[in-house]
């Protein structure tokens, strides 16, 4: 095995800290007892030593990648810093600073890293401009957004953004964050026991996938490739019932009521394989198949567990990642 291509690796960048302004930050610090904290607005994450970890130390990341047999990793924004709900000027400043700093990491290690761009989705013209700049000036391979920024993913308001992805010939990666950071809190119960990191993420991924499928994005933009994190959340658990919904309910678009139309649309969506747990992964794999499945780890995150599950799939996943990321066109040295 020549080494894996990992499409799901978040990074925290020194140059992005404070770029969204003094109110939002983001900011790193520590309490008197030495416990570290990470602040976004009035929300704090305690106990994660970002500066001393692979999230900010490239040499530690490379060492861990070598140990895990990961040859190439696509770096993307920390989900805590999508900042899709803050004032647009602050989000634009943050995304610009983030992508500039990320570009320097890619330049230093062009044989190990590729990048997805942070995008200010509350201002679509600015998001398109930042995507174009990141792809054309920095060689980034796509855009990276949250699942919720006040506009549904199937909305025609996003058509210009999707058209820009197609024109640039880059994929779009969709990954949730916890609500209540810089946007509305969906459900106070999710804050108990950190349930948002599992249940809310899965909910958001299922909603996002459903918007993409029922909204007919594959029909409106046949060349658009969208990848959803964590195997699409709970989507595959509900595949049969969603199919029945598509075919039987009058609320479904007329085109998707045709037999096979739902599955054809769902099978156009890409998913990463970071479904923790061997049995859960095998179930998701049986539902998703391998045609549009790529390797992803949430590298360095708390929810480890993908690496042990992919025996025998490394070659097909690498080829899928190369296709999704257009490596033959944009980075042939990485194939």
Image (tube, helix red, strand yellow):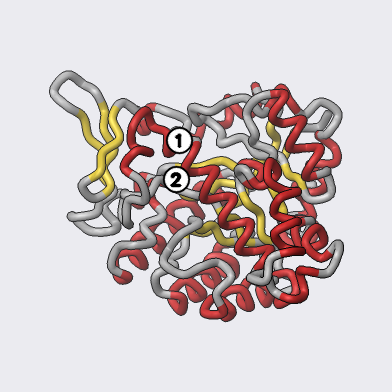
Task: Say if 256 sits above or below 63 in the image.
Answer: below
| Residue drawn at 31 percent across, 26 percent down | 47
Report whether 238 appears left or right of 136.
right
Quadrant into which the N terminus falls: top right
- The x, y position of residue 91, in whole percent, is 34, 64
Question: Pointer 1: residues within 10 angstroms few (<14), some, or many (20+)?
Answer: many
Q: Are marks 2 and 1 in contact (CB under 8 Å)?
A: yes
Q: Nearer the viewer, mark 2 or mark 1?
A: 2
Count of residue discs: 2
Report whether 316 appears left or right of 44.
right
Residue marked by disc 2: 78
Asked whether 59 or 21 is in front, the reply is 21
Q: CA distance from mark 2 to mark 1?
A: 9 Å
Asked whether 326 or 233 is in front, the reply is 233
Image quarter for residue 89? bottom left
| Residue drawn at 35 percent across, 32 percent down | 51
Residue marked by disc 1: 55
Report whether 50 appears left or right of 117.
left
């Amino acid at each position: 095995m020549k080494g894996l291509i990992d499409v799901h690796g978040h990074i925290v960048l020194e140059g992005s800290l404070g770029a969204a302004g003094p109110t939002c930050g983001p900011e790193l610090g520590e309490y008197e007892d030495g416990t570290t904290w990470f602040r976004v607005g009035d929300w704090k994450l305690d106990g994660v030593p970002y500066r001393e970890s692979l999230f900010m130390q490239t040499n530690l990341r490379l060492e861990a990648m070598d140990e895990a047999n990961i040859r190439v990793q696509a770096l993307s924004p920390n989900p805590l810093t999508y900042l899709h709900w803050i004032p647009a000027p602050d989000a634009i400043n943050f995304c610009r600073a983030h992508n500039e700093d990320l570009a320097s990491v890619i330049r230093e290690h062009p044989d190990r890293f590729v990048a997805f761009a942070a995008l200010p989705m509350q201002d679509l013209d600015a998001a398109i401009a930042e995507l174009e700049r990141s792809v054309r000036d920095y060689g980034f391979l796509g855009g990276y957004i949250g699942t919720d920024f006040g506009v549904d993913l199937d909305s025609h308001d996003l058509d210009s953004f999707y058209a820009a992805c197609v024109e640039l010939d880059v994929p779009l990666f969709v990954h949730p964050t916890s609500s209540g950071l810089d946007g509305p809190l969906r459900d106070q119960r999710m804050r108990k026991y950190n349930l948002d990191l599992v249940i809310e993420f899965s909910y958001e991924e299922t909603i996002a996938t459903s918007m993409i499928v029922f909204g007919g994005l594959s029909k409106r933009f046949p060349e658009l490739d969208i990848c959803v994190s964590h195997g699409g959340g709970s989507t595959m658990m509900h595949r049969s019932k969603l199919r029945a919904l598509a075919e039987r309910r009058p609320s479904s678009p007329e085109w998707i009521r045709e037999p096979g139309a739902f599955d054809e649309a769902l099978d156009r969506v890409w998913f990463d394989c970071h479904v923790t747990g061997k049995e859960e992964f095998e179930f998701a794999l049986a539902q998703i198949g391998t045609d549009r499945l790529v390797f992803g780890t949430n590298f360095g995150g708390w929810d480890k567990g993908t690496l042990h599950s992919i025996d025998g799939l490394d070659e097909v996943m690498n080829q899928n990642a190369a296709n999704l990321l257009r490596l033959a066109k944009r980075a042939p040295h990485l194939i």
